Amino acid sequence: MIVGLGNVGREYEGTRHNVGFMVADEVASKFKKKFLPGKGEYYVSEMRHAGEAVVLLKPTTFMNNSGVAVKDAAEKFGIELKDLLVICDDFNLSLGKLRLRKNGSDGGHNGIYSIIYHLNDDGFPRLRCGIGTEEVTPGRDMADFVLSKFEAEEIPEAEKMVKSAADAVFVFINEGIETAMNRFN
């Protein structure tokens, strides 16, 4: 199961915090699939790739409650933690950088925190997509920053990152987290 984190609603489209949704949409478009309302608080797109069932998920619980949807979907689809990849933004990484990890802390990300809390486990892979800029300064309101849209000059780099992140998702599906980490970190 591939989970892209973000917030639903027009006002959040194209914001830094919705990079996870953008990557999920890019993966779905490569499969020529669309997201449909799921039987829970999420949009879902199901497909097969290289003989494997793949579930793409976009929680509709808003970022801070992502764990509710992820836990529900993981139980419904019978997903093991090692087969779950969560995609999110990271303002501590420069715009365009990707960082894959097998497991770990929430790193200050409320969506990851919610997932860890609801699964009661941090043992799932995650793909962090850098949204940070040199203008991010200590004391700046991070909520305003992550909910802001990319500046015009940042859009090409953001689009390139989304495509690279989608490529990383395919490597994760085909070859596993170790190979994806070696290739994209």
Image (spheres, helix red, strand yellow):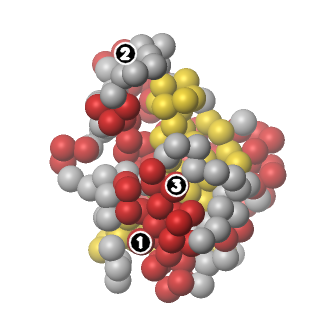
Residue hosting label 3: 112
Is residue 66 visible in the rendered image? The answer is: yes
Kind of residue sitting beneath label 2: Glu
Left of 86 or right of it: where is 111?
Answer: left
Q: Quadrant of the C terminus?
A: top right
Q: Are marks 2 and 3 in contact (CB under 8 Å)?
A: no
- C-alpha separation, residue under disc 1 versus residue under disc 2: 34 Å
- Residue 182 locus on image (x, y percent): 80, 41
Say which quarter of the image contains residue 135: top left
Question: For numbered disc 3, what is the local secondary structure?
Answer: helix
Q: Give coordinates of residue 5: x percent, y percent.
A: 43, 54
Q: Within 10 angstroms of label 2, few (less than 14), some, or many (20 or more) residues? A: few
Q: Earlier in the sequence, mark 1 or mark 2?
A: 1
Return the mark for residue 153.
Answer: 2
Tag 1–tag 3 contact (CB < 8 Å): no
**Percent position of residue 93, x then y:** 57, 29
Q: Residues within 10 Å of mark 1 (few under 14, many from 20)?
A: many
- Residue, x 31% and y 19% (percent of image)? 152
SS class of the residue under badge 2?
Answer: helix
Q: In 3D space, how far apart are the residues under numbered discs 1 and 3 (Cα atoms)? A: 12 Å
121, 85: nearer the viewer: 121
Q: Residue furthest front?
A: 139
Q: Quadrant of the N terminus?
A: bottom right
Three-letter code for the amino acid on which mark 1 is drawn: Ala
